Image (cartoon, coloured by chain):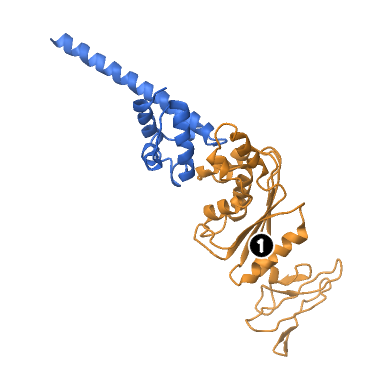
Amino acid sequence: MKTVQIPSGMDLTALYRQQMGDYPKFFKMDTASKLGVLLAEMLVQDEPDRFQPRQDRAVLVFSRSGSLADDTHFAASMEDFPSPAHFVYTLPNTVTGEIAIRNKYQGETSAFVLEAFDPGEVMNQIVLAFQDKVTRSVLALWIDAPSDEEWTAQGWLIDLEELLAPPQEHHCCHGGGHGGGCCGRHHHAESEEHHCCHHGEEGEEHHCCHHGEEGEEHHCHCHDNNKENE
Amino acid sequence: MVRKARNTTAIVTTTIKKTNKHMENLINELKLKVIEALNLDGMTPEDIADDAPLFGDEGLGLDSIDVLELIVFLEKNYGIRLANPQEGKQVFQSMAVMADYVAKHRTK
């Protein structure tokens, strides 16, 4: 999982020029959308083929204040002439659209207004987004910008493969052994040298465990269709 | 005869220079006012090329909603009424085109 954040009060124009610089539509956006587009940019800008249209990435935006800052600007403009430029940002889900347009995402987009930041609910919605058999990646953002000067803005990029992968706490690797460069799960004791490896083939059951002591040869015990290799 | 021709050339050159200067000033004025009217927060006049398209990804990135904003903008600032939004798309091709239109049609 990749995580980024934009500190409150940061100069967003300077950040835009540093991170993007090629998307003038940015200047039109309300603060929440600017934060969303910048967070997304920071999360995905290194991806190959990033501007290829794709349907397998969902965009989920969570907020407390929604579009309140722009709502306030629009309300003020109504005293003279209601501003269409402000009006288009008076919805909390506009930010999801801006991110999707910029990055050519054609998958699920959702916006949620919560009473407060709720990691459990965020995770719950991320898991739900993966249920549609299309979504393989989720861009999840917490953007709360009650004004143009103050906000909290954080983003996460989660791939389905990561969620399905074994927990990382009991992870061990070893470059040698059976084909080398493979990983399995290993529960190791503190301060113990620990290596265990197995080059898992597709469809093969693979487990390997070894409590390596310092200076000791490392061994892998692998199960391949009930046949143990060493 | 030659002197008269030289004087005429000088007058024409001066007029062109004055017109160019006038247009340059008007384009800059429009850029500043459009940035304010469309809330292009953080953008500067230098970010907008005179001939760059105002709509679409290559230019300023404006869309049909912004046409409405610019129509209101022309009426409030220069007394120009555009009844048809389609006409607006022609007028708002670029800052240079808009400045030319404003110079020819303004009532204030």
Q: Is residue A57 visible?
A: yes
Residue at horizontal 45 percent and vertical 40 percent from the top:
B67
Image quarter where the C terminus of chain A lies is: bottom right
Residue A150 vertical placement versus A121 (above, below): above
User: Is residue B12 toward the left or the right of residue A14 in the image?
Assistant: left
Residue B4 vertical placement versus A27 (above, below): above
Viewer-proximal residue, A101 or A72? A72
Q: Amino acid at mark 1?
A: Ile
Quadrant of the rendered image containing residue A197: bottom right
User: Is residue A61 toward the left or the right of residue B90 in the image?
Assistant: right
Viewer-proximal residue, A188 or A191? A188
- Mark 1, other Cα within 10 Å: few <14 / some 14–19 / many ≥20: some
Residue A192 vertical placement versus A74 (above, below): below
Give the chain letter for orange: A
Residue A167 vertical placement versus B50 (above, below): below
Question: Mark 1 sits on what residue?
Answer: A158
Give the percent coordinates (x, y) of residue B68.
47, 40
Q: Circle 1 — which element?
A: strand
Quadrant of the rendered image containing residue A88: top right
Residue at horizontal 80 percent and vertical 77 percent from the top:
A210
Chain letter behind tag 1: A
Give the percent coordinates (x, y) of residue B33.
49, 29
Give the chain letter for blue: B
Residue at horizontal 72 percent and vertical 71 percent from the top:
A173
Give the percent coordinates (x, y) of residue A164.
69, 72
